[in-house]
Every structure is written in C-alpha cells, then in structure tokens.
DNA sequence: TTGACAAACGGAGCACCGCTCCGAATATAA
DNA sequence: TTATATTCGGAGCGGTGCTCCGTTTGTCAA
C-alpha cells in the first residue's frame, strides 16, 4: 500500500472509532470522512461498505472473544463458562451501539464483510454450548443459532435506552432458561 | 373536521397501512403521501410525527390486546393466560416490521404519540404477570417493565430475517424462564 | 346565491444522507 | 527527472425528513 494511503486508512479508522463510539453504527460516513480530513471517495475506497468499516472496528473484539472462548473451554464448570462467555459477547456488541443489527444481517449474507466474523462468533458459542449440553447443564433443545439469536436479542435490548436498566437482570433471566442445573423454586424478588 | 380533510385523513391512513405493511415502519412518508395523492404538508398536518401515524395504524391492535388481557384474566390457569397473551403481544408488533423500536422509545417519552398505548400495553401485561406470580406460577423477580422488555426483544428478534426460523422456539425458551411450574429436567431436543 | 374567512392544501426549499464517478494530484520506481 | 499506476477528493445524483407559506377550497352567514 502506498504511504499516503496507509496514513489515510489509519486516520479513518481512528476517527471512525471515535465517531461510531459517540454516535453509533449508523453515524454519517460523510461526517467520518470530514473529521478525518479526507474525501468521501477515499473513505469508500478503503471501506467499500459500512459493514467493512464496522468489521475493521470490531476485528480485535471478535478475536478477543474467540480467544476467551478457548480459555473458557478449559473451565471445570461448563455452565459457568458458557454464561461468562455470553456475558462478554453481549458486552462486546455493546461497544458500538447499533452494531448488532448489521451483525445479524451478516450471518445470513455470505457477501457481507461481517459474515466471517459473525460465523466464528457463533462457532465459539456453539462449542461452549455443546460442552455444557454434554455435561447436562444446558438445555438440549438449543443450538448455536439459538444462542446467537439470544445474544443478539440481549444486545439489542441493552441498546434501547429505556430498557437499559433491565438489561442485566434480563440477562440473568435468559441465562437461567439456558442452564438446567439451577435451583429455581421460585426466583424470589431482588435482594432475596 | 372539514369534509375534504376527513377524506384525506382516511385515504392517508389506508395507504399508510398498505405501504407500512409492505415496507415497514421506516417507509418513506413522502412515498405514502404520493401514493395517497396528497401533498407532503397534508400528511404532516394529519400526522405530525411518524409515531402519530404508527399510533393510528396500531390503535385497533392495542385495543384488541387490552381486551384479550381482560378475558385472559378470567382463565383458571394464570400461567397459560400469561403465555397466551405474550404470544399475541409479540405477534401484534409483528404486524408492521420495524414498529417495535419506536414503541420502546415511546415508553420513556411522555411526549410521544405512542406513549399512552405502550403504557397501557405494559399495564395489561403487568396484570397478567402479577396474577401468575400470586399463584406461584411465574418467577417473582420480574415486573411489568421486564415483561415489556422481553416482549420487545422477542418482537425484534422475529423482525430480523435470519432469526425468524428460531423465533417461535426462542419464544418457548423465554416463556419457560418466566414460568416456574414447568417440568423441566433437561429440555430434550425437538421431537422428544 | 353570494360573498367572506377560516381551514386545509401542496409542494418548493433546506439540510442532510448513501453512494458513484472521474479529472486532478501524488507517491514511487525506472 | 520522468512516466505511470495509484490514490485522492468532491461534485453530482437521487433519495430522505421536515418546515413554511402562498394558494385553494369548504363552510356558513347574510
């Protein structure tokens, strides 16, 4: 890559990280280019689609999550491992608001720049789920797609301002639906 | 209301119902006005905001849902009543894709045209939930807001094309998290 | 029937968006 | 230094939400 191109690429990524953090994944790309001191054409050349830009921004997060899954597979308690990973997966998408919708769309679109990342995300979750199922601590009528969908739903939920206060609690509610080994006579109100 | 105004209002609502059904709640309002053979200004006079238009479109659905809740309160089994209502609530938002996001936003925005409808929706769910909790068939660490949030999440999920095939199943998964009286040794795979 | 007037209409206009396209500028290698 | 491939940048196109106001029209009283 030519030196000036590399410089612009880096600059765009840095600025995009800032703008998307502040305004969400739907931020104006024109605005990103402007703030990066670069023409709109330059942005589109480096990142042909919005998904491509998002993928570049999330790259490291995806990798970290895959790495975390590898380590969690060694845990003694596959149920805790699964829930721990789920929590991190939801938190990750939480980094850039509005990112979950394109991710969901990407998993069914092989042409999307986010496709591979989302598939590997699902694969990581599937490994942890299957292990938990084999040990009898996760319900067996779910697969990786279901897990991915639940992560998406929880991520979306935590992205809606009015629902944010409930997000953590609902994570627990849904986790309890996935796990089978919990003592759950009646789930007394908070504090109990 | 003047006769011509009434005619335009009705026409707009009819066309909007068609367009929003086909293109979702984010449909172009310009397009609605054009197809209704009416100026853009006329549309905005009758429906000052997109939420106002959506509210008009959903009005009957909201009422039906409240009515259904009243009848379900008479059921012997409050658990079944709750789940039955939940299913209808999710299906309702399903009528117009993309409608759930503005509804969620509206519940925290008293100025929104959708606010009252969403509040009464939440109230209806709360009644059924409280009754189920009193009978010991629903977990007690949830309230109406949690229920509303779960409905929203399920509605959103069913609105994402790649997740549609899982939506029904995940409804069952989440329902099982809300109810406490289910036999749930391990949830064998489908068919079992 | 005919005015007068409030009410309703409708679209031009503004600022923004995503995205494409291509002449101008520039880094690089000969 | 020069030639060339690469990169740049923004004008331009068609779309959006929304406002504003000159024009038209329904209505009702005279």
Image (cartoon, coloured by chain):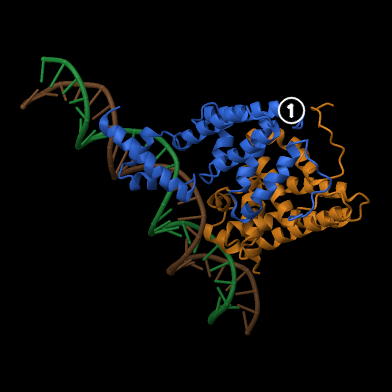
Chain colours: A orange, B blue, C brown, D green
Q: Horizontal placement of B172 versus A74: left or right? A: left
Q: Residue at x 69, y 63 (%)?
A: A116
Q: Locate residue B171: give its quadrant.
A: top right
Q: Is residue A36 above or below residue A162?
A: below
Q: Is residue B9 above or below residue A138?
A: above
Mark 1 belongs to chain:
B
Q: Locate residue A129: give its quadrant.
A: bottom right
Q: Residue at x 62, y 40 (%)?
A: B87
Q: Classify the position of the N terminus of chain B by image quarter.
A: top left
Q: Is residue A35 visible?
A: yes
Q: Is residue A94 visible?
A: no
Find residue B160 and report its horizontal and vertical position in percent: 60, 51
- Secondary structure category for the residue under label 1: helix
Q: Classify the position of the C terminus of chain B by image quarter.
A: bottom right
Find residue D7 and report its horizontal and vertical position in percent: 59, 66
Front position in the image: B35 or A185: A185
For label 1, count other residues whose C-alpha is less than 10 Å away and answer few (under 14), some (14-19) or many (20+). many
Q: Horizontal placement of C26 versus D10: left or right? A: right
Residue corresponding to mark 1: B133
Find residue A169 and report its horizontal and vertical position in percent: 75, 35
């Amino acid at each position: 890559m030519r030196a000036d191109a590399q410089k612009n690429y880096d600059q765009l990524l840095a600025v995009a990280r800032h703008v998307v953090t502040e305004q969400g994944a739907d931020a104006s790309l024109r605005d990103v280019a402007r703030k990066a001191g670069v023409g709109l054409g330059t942005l589109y050349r480096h990142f042909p689609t919005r998904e491509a830009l998002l993928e570049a921004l999330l790259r490291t997060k995806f990798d970290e999550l895959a790495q975390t899954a590898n380590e969690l597979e060694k845990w003694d308690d596959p149920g805790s491992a699964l829930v721990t990973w789920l929590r991190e997966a939801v938190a990750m998408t939480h980094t850039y608001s509005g990112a979950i919708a394109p991710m969901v769309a990407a998993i069914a679109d092989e042409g999307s720049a986010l496709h591979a990342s989302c598939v590997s995300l699902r694969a990581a979750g599937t490994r942890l789920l299957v292990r938990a199922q084999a040990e009898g601590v996760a319900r067996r009528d779910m697969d990786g797609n279901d897990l991915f969908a639940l992560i998406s739903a929880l991520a979306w939920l935590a992205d809606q301002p009015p629902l944010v206060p409930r997000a953590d609690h609902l994570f627990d509610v849904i986790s309890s639906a996935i796990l089978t080994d919990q003592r759950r006579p009646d789930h007394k109100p908070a504090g109990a």
